[in-house]
Image (spheres, coloured by chain):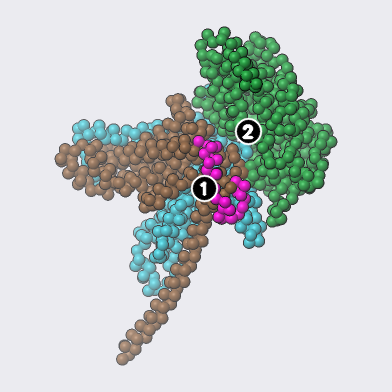
Amino acid sequence: METGLKPIGREQWWVFLLLAPTLFGLLFGVFGSVFATLGISFFSWDLLTPPQWAGLENYLSLLSDPAFGKSLANTTLFSLTYVPGVIVVSLFVALLLNRRIRGVSIFRLIYFLPVISSAVAVGLVWSWIYARDQGILNVLLRGVGLQPVNWLSSQMALFSVVIVNVWGAIGEGMIVFLAGLQAIPRDYYEAAQVDGATAWQEFWKITLPMITPSIFFQAIISTINAFQAFEYIYILTRTTGGGSSVPTVVFTIYRTGFNYFRMGEACAQAVVLTVIIVVLTIIYFQMQRRWVVYE
Amino acid sequence: MNETRTLAETSSQNVSLHQDIRVQRVLADVLTYALLLIGSIAMVGPFIWMLSTSLKLPADQFSRTLIPNTATLENFQTLWAMLPINYLLINSFKIALITTIGQIITCGMAAFVFAVVRFRFRETLFFVLLATLMVPSQVTIVPNFILFRALGLYGTQAPLWLPAFWGGAFGTFLLRQFFRTIPLDLAEAARVDGASLWQIFLRIYLPLARPALAALAIFIFLQSWNNLLTPLIYLPADLEQTTLPVGLALLQAQFPGRWTIQMAGALVSIAPIILVFFFAQRQFIEGIALSGVKR
Amino acid sequence: MKKLLLACVVLLLLSTGISLAQDTPVEITYMMWGSPEELAVWQVIVDDFEAANPNIQVNVDVSDWDSYWSRLQTLFAGGTPPDVFAMDAPLYRDWQSRGVLLNLQPYLDANPTALDGVYPSTLEAYQLEDGIYGLPRDFQTIVLFYNKDLFDAAGLDYPNEDWTMDDLRAAAAELTVDVDGDGVTDQWGLYADLYDMELFWSSVIWSYGGEILNEDYTQTLLAEGPARDAWYFINSMAVEDRSMPDPTQVTQYGDPFAAGVAAMTTIGHWVIPEYADLPFGWDVAPMPSGPEGRATSVNSAGFVVAANTPNADAAWQFIQYAISSTGQTRLTELGFAIPVLQSVAESPVFLEQQTAPINHQVFLDALEYAHVKPSFRGYEEWAAVVGDGLLPVWNGEISIDEALDSIVPAANDVLAANQ
C-alpha cells in the first residue's frame, strides 16, 4: 500500500519542481549519455573533423586490438586480486575490532585515514615508497637481508597497485563489516559456547554465514570500484609517453578519448565496459540467491 | 549429599574453566592488539614518511632517517613558487563546495518527494533512478564532454560542478531512506496548519535529516576534492583554473625525482581533509559507511 | 652604455612602428611548450616585437611538454585554438592532416625572401605537396654530454670525435659503480631516454645502417637486419652491463645526469641553461660512431597557425619576426635553442654564448650526419606503442627479441589505421 501525502491543487507543481533536476539528470545526464555513447560508438570522430559513419568498425577493431585485450586482461586480473583482497583484509580487521577491547575508536580512525585521503597524494607517496633503490620498502627489505623488489616494473606494477588499492579501501570495508558483525545477535554465540564450539567453529558456523549480506554488498562495491579504478593507476604506472605500464580499461578509455581524440572508439570501449559490469552484476545477484543468508 | 558433591565439582570445574577462558581472553587481547598495531603502522606509515620527507632538505631526500637531519620548510616555499597552490586549493575547495551544495539540494528535493509525496508512477520512477547506479561513469564521459564543448563551457570549471545540480541516484536513495524514518504525522499536521510542500520540506524534513545530510555532504565533498579524472579531462593544464589533484599529477610529471617537493605537495592536499576529519570523525565514517556504491 | 643602446633601439623600433599604428589593434595568442625560463625568453622577444608592431599584442602561453599537447588538443576540440602555436616536427603531419593548420604558402609567395638563410634541412619537414603549413623556429641535434668530474675520478679520457659505440659501452661499464658500497648501483655510465627515438635509439639504429620506417611510413623497420643489431647493442648496455639506469631507477632521480649519478647522457641543446648551474664540470662530444658511420637525429620545433584564426596576418608578422635575424639572435642569446638562420648559428651569438663555456660547434657539425626525425600521421601513438613495448626489456623482464617481435605488428597496425 502506498503511503504519503497526496498533492492537492497547486502542490502538483511543487512536486514537479522538486523533481525537475532529477528528471533532467535522468533524461540528459544518464539516458541521453547512454544513447549518445552508443550512437557515437558507430562513428569515427576526432572532434576536429566531422564525424564519419563507421558502422561496427570500432567494435571490430577492439576485437583485434591487442592493447584493448591487454587492458581487459589487466582490469580482470586487477579485480580478481583486489576484490578478494579487500574483503579478506577488511573482514579480518573488522573481526579484530569487533572484540570488545579498548581503543577501538582510535584504531578505527587510523584505518580510516587512507579512505579520506586524496588518491593522487597517496599515489605520490606510494610511488616514493616503491622507488627502485631509494624507496623505503626496498631499503627495509635489503636491511633484513631480502632481495629488493622492482615494485613498479611492468610485471610487478599490477600487483603493487592492487596493494595500494586494498590498503586504501580497508577502512571502508571495515566499517561495512563492523556494522554486519554488530548486528549478529549475541545469544547465537552463547548457544554455541554451551555446545562447546571452538572459536574457529563459531567463525565458520555463525559469523561467516551471518555476514554474507555484508560480504555480498562489499563484493559488489569493490567490483564496481575495481572496474573504475583510475587515480592510483594513473599516478603509479604512467609512462613517459603518457601511457601506462598497466593500462586498465578506464585508463584506455581516457587515453583513446582524451589523448588521441578517437571518440568513437572510446565510446565503443565504454559500451564494452558497461556490458561487462551489467553482466557481472547479474551474476552477483544470481550468486546471492545461492550463498547469501538472510534471516 | 550426592547432589552437593556434584554441585561443588561443577563449580570448581567452572572456576578452572573460567580461569582458562580468562587466560585465553588475555592472550587473545594481546594478539589482537599486536595485529592491530602492525596494521596501524602499515596504515599510518606512508603518511609519516610523507611528512618526514617533506621536511627534509632536498639534498637529504635519500637519507633513510625518519627524523630529518635538518628540518626545513624550504620544500613548501619551493612548492608555492612552482605551482599556484593557492589557486589550486581555492579551486578545489570552491568546486567541492558547489558540488556538495548542488547535490544536497537536488537530491534532497527528489528524496523528499519520493519519501513523502504520493503520486502516480512514484515507485517505477524511483526504480528507474536506482537502476542508473549500474551505469558506470565512463559511459557519460564522452557525451558530457561533447555537450559542454557545444555549450562553450569547455575550459571552464562549470563541467566539474554543473552535473551536481542534476540530482543523482545515490544521494537521493540515501536521503529517501532517512526521510522515511521521519513520522508522516508531522507533515500531515503541518499541512493542516496550511504549510505548503516546499515549507514542509524546508522546515521539517531538512532540519530533522541533519545527520544524514552531514554524512552525505562529507561524502560528496571528499569525492569531489579527490577526483582526478574529470578535472584532467576538462582542465588538464590551466593551473589557475584546475584542481589540486591535477596540479599534483603535473608536479609529478614536471619535477620527477624531486621527492621532497612532491611529498610537500601531497601533504598540502591531504592536510585540510585530515584536520576536518579529526573534528568530524563520526560524520565522516557514517558518510563513507553509506558510501561505496558510487565512486 | 648598454642601457643607452637599448633605449636607442627601442626608440628606433617605436618610430618604425608608428606607420603601422593606424591599423586596428589585434591580440594574438602564441602557445608553446617549455619551462618558465623559456617563457621569460619569449616574453623578451614578444616585447621587442610589440615595440616594433604596436598594433599587435601577443600573449605568450607556456606549459610543460605533456600538458601542452593535451591542452592544445582540447583547445582545438573546444573550438578556441591559439592563433600561433609551437609544433614538434614529428607531429606536424598528424596535425596538418586534420585540416586545422593554415597554409602559409601565400605569405611566402608574397615575401619571397622570408626564408633566406634558413637551414634547408630544417625546412624539409614542413614542406608538403600543396604548400607549407609551418615554419621552423629552432632546431635541435642530439650530442653526447659528459660529466668531467666523474671521468676524472675514474681516470678515463673524455669522449671525443673518434669514439665508437664500443668505446661508449666500455667507458659506460667502467663508470657504473656502487659508490657508497651498500650493494646497490648508484652511479651509471650512461643515461639516455629509451622511450622516444629522438634522444638515443634512432641514432644508434642509423649508425648501424638500419632504418626505422620505410619511405611512405607504412612499415616499421626497426627490427630488420642492422636495426636489430643496434637494439642488441643498446640491450648489451642497458640489460647486460646495466650501465644505464632502468626506467624505474630513472624516475628516482628525474634526470640522472643532472643529479650527478650518470656520467654521460645524450640530449639536445635545450638543457644548456639548466645544466649551466650544475655543480660539476661537463662538456659535449659528438655522438659515437657505429659500424656504418656516425649518425644523430635532428628535429625542429616550428610555428604553425590555426586554420581558422581571424588574425592570420598578425600571426604571420609575428612568425616572420621570430625567424628574422633580430628574433633569432634574441632566441639564441637566451641559450636554449639552435637558431634556424645559418648566419646567426655560425655567429658568436651562438658559438660563444655565455651560459656555458662548452663546445657549441658540436651541435652545428652534427647537421652533417644527422637524420631528420620522422614525421607522420599517428606519430604519437606509434611512439607510445614502441616506447611502452620496450619498457619490460629495460626492466629486465622480457628479451629484446621478444619485445621487437610483438612491437612491430602493433606499430604497423597504428600506421595502417592512420593512412
| Residue furthest left in the image | B193
Mark 1: secondary structure: helix
Question: Numbered disc 2: what chain?
Answer: C
Determine crowd level at label 2: few under 14, some 14-19, many 20+ residues with C-alpha closer than 10 A. Answer: some
Task: Check the rendered structure and report the hue given to chain B.
Answer: brown
**Which secondary structure, mark 2?**
helix
Q: Nearer the viewer, residue C287 or C334?
A: C334
- Does the CB distance between marks 2 and 1 fall below 8 Å? no
Which residue is found at the position 71% from the left and 24% from the top?
C349
Is residue A188 shown above or below C145?
below
Q: Is residue A275 above or below residue C3?
A: below
Which label is found at residue C273? none
Percent x, y of residue A191? 36, 70
Picture colour for chain C? green
- Give the drawing colour for chain A: cyan
- Checking the image for residue A122, the label placed there is 1
- The residues colored magenta run B58-84
Distance CA(mark 2)–CA(mark 1): 29 Å
Q: Nearer the viewer, residue C174 or C130?
A: C174
